[in-house]
Amino acid sequence: MSLECVQCGSQFPLYPLKSKCEKCGGALEYDIGLPEKYEVEFSGKLRLWKYKDLLPPVQNIVSLGEGGTPLHKAERLAEELGLKELHLKDETRNPTNSFRDRAGALLTSNAVDLKYDMLICATNGNLGASLAAYSAKAGLICHVIVPKLVDVGKLAQMLVYDAVIEEFGETVDDSIRRSEAIADETGWYQATAELNPLVIEAQKTIAYEAYEQLGVPDWFIVTMGGGGTIYSIWKGFKELKQLGITESLPKMVGLQPEGCAPIVETLEKNSSEPVKILSPSTRALAVLVTSPLQGELAMKAIKESEGLALKVSDSKILEAELQIAKLEGIFAEPASSATIAATKELVKNRKIDKNDTVMCLITGSGLKATDILQVLTKKQKTAVLSLEISTKEKILQTLNREDTYGYDLWKKLGKTITRAAIYQHLNELSEKGLIASYRKTGRKFFKITERGRKALRAIDDMKHLL
Ligand SMILES: [Zn+2]
C-alpha cells in the first residue's frame, strides 16, 4: 500500500500523514494494493468496518455505528420523474446525520493510532459536526474552522459536542487555508476533507454498500463541493471491478448549484485552468466552495465514467427538497436534494433513459440546514396570500351575479372570515377600481366594475392554464 500523488505520481510512506504532494503540491491518494481475492463476503449486515481490509490500516477503531445506511427504492418519486427505478442512498441515517461520519470514524481512529490529541479541520459544517462527535467519543480535542455562512444546525452540533470553533473567511476556501497554517504551526492532526486522503477511502464504502444493496446502477448522481465525494464513490466502484466482484461501472453525474459551479464551468469551458467563482451565491451551503481543491479528481470521475456534469438552480433544489420529503418521507439537506433536481432535468432532456437505474446520494439531513425552514415559512406566507386572493375572487364572483351590501356578502361567503376582513377586502377592491359602491335604501351597496369583470376573466384564464 502506498500514498501517491494524483498529478506527478510521486510515492510517499503512509505516515506521517501528508496533505499534499511534497514535490508538486498535487492531491494525494491511497493505492491500497487490492488483494488478488477478497476474503470478506459482499453480503450480510452492513457496517463501515466490515470493509476494514479495503481501507488503510487501523488499530484503534473509534465508532459510533457509522455506515450501513439504507438504500430506499423511491417509487413515488420515480413515478413523478418518469423513471422506472430510482434509489436514494440515505446517508442522513448516520450518527450525526451525514455521510461525513464515515470519514469522522476513520480519521479519528487514525489520529488515535498516531497518538495525536488535537485535530483541526476546515468545514462547511457536516465534517466539523462529525469530527466533533467522534473526537468527543475518542477524547480528542477538535478544532473547527468555519466560514461566515454555515448552516445553524451543524454549528449547533459542533457546539454541543464541545468542539473549539473559530470563524474565518467568507467561504470555506479561506477556512481551509487557515487550517493549513494552524496545522503547520501546531502540528495538529489535519482532518480537513480536501487535505486528508483518508476521507476518500472512508467515503468509497458508500459504493461498496450500494453494490451490496442493489448492484451497480446505470447512473450515480452526486452533488459536488470540494470535489472529493464524487471521486470517492467512483473509486469504490472501480475497486469492486478490480476485485472481480462486478463487471460494470456506473456513469457518474456531478452537479453544482448554479450560483457556485466552478467544476461544472471548468468542464463546460474545457479549460485547463480551473474556473474560480468570484461572487458565489447558493442556499446549498454544504457545497459553497469557490475554488475546489479536488476539482481535478471530480472531473476525472466524470470523464472516466463517461458521465455528465450540470448546474441546478436554487429554486429547483428547494422544489426537489420538498418533493423528496412529501413523496418519500426523507428530509434531505439542500445540497443533496439537488441530485433529484438534476435527475429530473436529465430525464426531461433524455440524457437519462426512463428505463435506466438511477441512484442518488443523499448526503445529509435537512434538519441541519435551517435556511430551508425560513424558506418554508415564506411559503406559508404565500399560502395565506393565495387564500386572500381567493376571498377577493369569491367577492368578485358574487358581485358579478348581483349587487349587494357588506353584511349580505359576509353571509354569502359562509361567515368563514370576520366581517372586518370582508370590509378590508371591499376597500382594497374599490381602491383598485375592481368594484364600486353606491347607496340604496340606507345601505352601502357594491357592484363589480368593467375592470373587475376583466380581472375575473383573467383569473379564469389563469386557472385553465394551470
Ligand atoms: Zn506530485
Image (cartoon, rainbow, N blue to C red):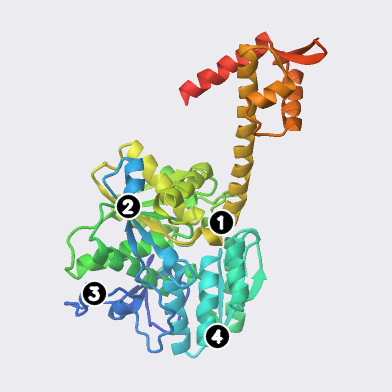
* Residue 107, percent from left and from top: 45, 78
Identify the residue position indicated by label 4 in the image: 140
Residue 212 falls in image quadrant: bottom left
Q: Quadrant of ligand 1?
A: bottom left
- Quick check: marks 2 and 1 in contact, CB under 8 Å? no
The Cα–Cα distance between marks 1 and 3, rounded to whole angstroms, is: 36 Å
The Cα–Cα distance between marks 3 and 2, rounded to whole angstroms, is: 33 Å
Q: Amino acid at mark 4?
A: Leu
- Quick check: marks 1 and 4 in contact, CB under 8 Å? no
Q: Which residue is at the front of the view, 216 or 305?
A: 216
- Quick check: marks 4 and 2 in contact, CB under 8 Å? no
Is residue 216 shown left or right of residue 166?
Answer: left
Is residue 99 shown left or right of residue 133?
Answer: left
Residue drawn at the location 80% of the way across and 15% of the way down: 443
Identify the residue position indicated by label 3 in the image: 44
Q: Residue furthest right?
A: 442
Q: Which residue is at the front of the view, 466 or 175?
A: 466
Residue drawn at the location 61% of the way across and 75% of the way down: 160
The Cα–Cα distance between marks 2 and 1, rounded to whole angstroms, is: 26 Å
Q: Amino acid at mark 3?
A: Gly
Quadrant in which the N terminus is drawn: bottom left
Secondary-structure class at tag 4: loop
* Residue 88, percent from left and from top: 35, 56
Is residue 176 shown left or right of residue 48?
Answer: right
Residue drawn at the location 33% of the way across and 75% of the way down: 47
Task: Name the N-terminal-most of marks 1 and 3.
Answer: 3
- The numbered dot on residue 303 is 2
Question: Could you classify mark 2 by the number of other residues whose Cα lies within 10 Å: few (under 14), some (14-19), or many (20 or more)?
Answer: some
Q: Nearer the viewer, mark 3 or mark 2?
A: 3
Q: Amino acid at mark 2?
A: Lys
Task: Name the N-terminal-most of marks 2 and 1.
Answer: 1
